[in-house]
Image (cartoon, rainbow, N blue to C red):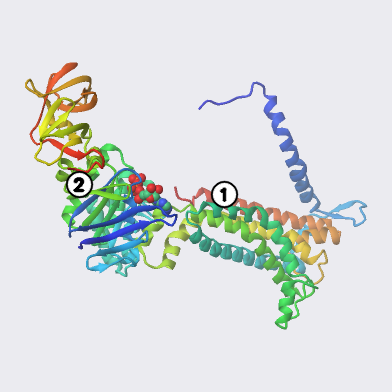
Amino acid sequence: MAQVTLDNVRKVYPNGFEAVKPASYNIADGEFVVLVGPSGCGKSTMLRMIAGLEDISDGALKIGDRQVNKVDPADRDIAMVFQNYALYPHMTVRKNIGYGLKNRKIDKSTIEAKVQEAATMLNLTEYLDRKPSQLSGGQRQRVAMGRAIVRDPSLFLFDEPLSNLDAKLRNQMRIEIKALQRRLGVTSIYVTHDQIEAMTMADRIIVMNGGIIEQIGTPAEVYHSPASTFVASFMGAPPMNLLEGRVDGGMIRVGDTVVGNTTLAVTGPVTVGIRPEDLEPSVGGQLRIDVSIIEELGAHRLVHGHIAGQALTMQIGKDTAIGDGPIPVAIKNNAVSLFDHQTGNRL
Amino acid sequence: MKRAGFSTRWLPIMLLLPQLLIIVIFFYWPAWHAVRSSFFLQDPFGFGETFVGLKNYASLFKSSAYMRSAWFTLFFVVLVTFFSLAIALLFAVKADKVLRGAKTYRTLLMWVYAVAPPVAGVLGVIMFDQSWGPATEFFALLGYDFRLGVNYYDTAFAMVVVSVWKQLPVNFIFFLSGLQSIPRSVREAALIDNRSASSRFWDITFPLLAPTGFFLLITNITYAMFDTFGVIDVLVRGEPGNNPLTLVYKVYVDGFRGNDLGGSSAQSVVLMVLVLAMTVFQFRMVERRIHYT
Ligand SMILES: Nc1ncnc2c1ncn2[C@@H]1O[C@H](COP(=O)(O)OP(=O)(O)OP(=O)(O)O)[C@@H](O)[C@H]1O
Ligand SMILES: [Mg+2]
């Protein structure tokens, strides 16, 4: 087990592109950290630097107490699960799982025992003699997991391990991976662009955008107090409503409507953020929303409408009756976030 | 899928006819002719022929010159195939390291494939030219009198070197593209699993190259046996003398220099059987699938 420390770690590709701007953070022993962000934001680059598959351009990386900038991937005591599984196509499942041990001078009977143990844990025992091409996507995914856990590494790295699976299997594997990690207690870094995976699996989330870390925090912190409009719109489906508004005398207004008040010392234009589920139809509500479309999602409904000419989405329970046209809506307490209207940073 | 069909029965036959004609005229007809004349003794001056049954074959396998040529061919094929595959693989592995991801270089390297083989053949021959070939001069510097076309072993050496030299670019390109088609993540997984580069090569890269390797093995054997005719002809210049000859070149020498059409036909029938056996072997192996999906 180990903690991971990054100190101003930066990546510049040979073509001059800075994929990761200097990043510093600390991952505690046994923690499950999810790196999330849109495509091309540098998540894989970050992970691959930690794995040693990509050189670190600047800064220091520590796994445990050891600086590993120049250490070979095989010597970093890590295991990685790749998006397309990266199984060895010419080896059986048994050999695939055991390959990493075989090269670490472990005797045959110990390897066999460990492979069996991992296979049992992952329900793979009956497939041990098959080649990867004879397995389904979910089974291949399990083999990739097996290859990682069999070595008892001090750090697991996952690069979008579930994105090639269908939705149902993805949900199932998500829970299995999380449970496995809990059981083994191995520090893990998990890359995904799926914010649901991030929210459900993470102890802490690192949100990245354009090579920059936008926010590091627990799922609740990231969700309820997003550090920027980017995080606000990236985390959560449907995303947080971001409205043009202004603050004067402690009153937050969108158009002519007062949506709340603030103790912050700001005046002038701001971006107002409200989560769709923090809005609810209420006879005494202070907002007038002009409803245009209602989406049925089964468990709940999404109501799309306008306020002061700006689009707004509201999430309501499946039993709440609602009609077209202007309706009164209330905002739950402490549900309004304020962002700088130019930089997008949280105020 | 919708099947496209022809409205008349004759159109497809007409379309196939030119190809079929070429095959019949240039392949089946001469092949049949060779099989037939291998059972006859031809008059050297073209006055008729006598049926002799299997006598041509019998004398073939009793002839020490033929057996010598057969042994030489075996050594020649083994050496040429081994070295052209091994050296090409070595180069490809080195190039692959430099080329990962660099597409422009890859396209440039394809040019080697397009340009090199014929040019390389000519160059190789020039290298060993008796009067001013750099290789000959190099050997002279070392105090060795390299005598192409006179010394049996010198000629054999030059034949192997030029044949390997000529085949290298083709093998190189195939190995390189084989290497580049190994998924990056598989190599990276191996990088994490195994610290030793050489054992990674033998455990992961080499087995994944097996389909390419097998294909090249067959084509190289075929090349060494049959397609080296040109190289040998240039080196030996139709003067068999004391020179080593491959079976294919011997067919030509005996038939056209020695005017022994019956014996030469019997030799080519033996070669046909060899090719047939190799083809069957290749199909068997392909069926057993040495490739991974
Ligand atoms: N070898 C390279 N040379 C130059 N630029 C690269 C290289 N590899 C990646 N990049 C660039 O670095 C940026 C980050 O890439 P990275 O693969 O880390 O993104 P990602 O966040 O993992 O995206 P995705 O979700 O699509 O996997 C991208 O803009 C990409 O184009
Ligand atoms: Mg990625």
Q: Chain of mark 1?
A: B
User: Is A172 displayed left or right of B254 in the figure?
Assistant: left
Q: Which mark is residue A201?
A: 2
| Amino acid, disc 2 | Met
Residue depth check, mark 1 versus mark 2: number of the one nearer the observer = 2
- Report which residue position mark 1 lands on: B283
The residue that appears at 28% across and 66% down in the rendered structure is A109
Q: Nearer the viewer, residue B81 or B117?
A: B117
Q: Up-down: is B257 above or below A254?
A: below
Q: Nearer the viewer, residue A274 or A85?
A: A274
The residue that appears at 77% across and 75% down in the rendered structure is B147
For label 1, the SS is helix
Whether the residues at callouts 1 and 2 have beta carbons within 8 Å, the answer is no
**Residue B261 is drawn in which quadrant?**
bottom right
Q: Nearer the viewer, residue B157 or A309?
A: A309
**Residue A299 is drawn in which quadrant?**
top left
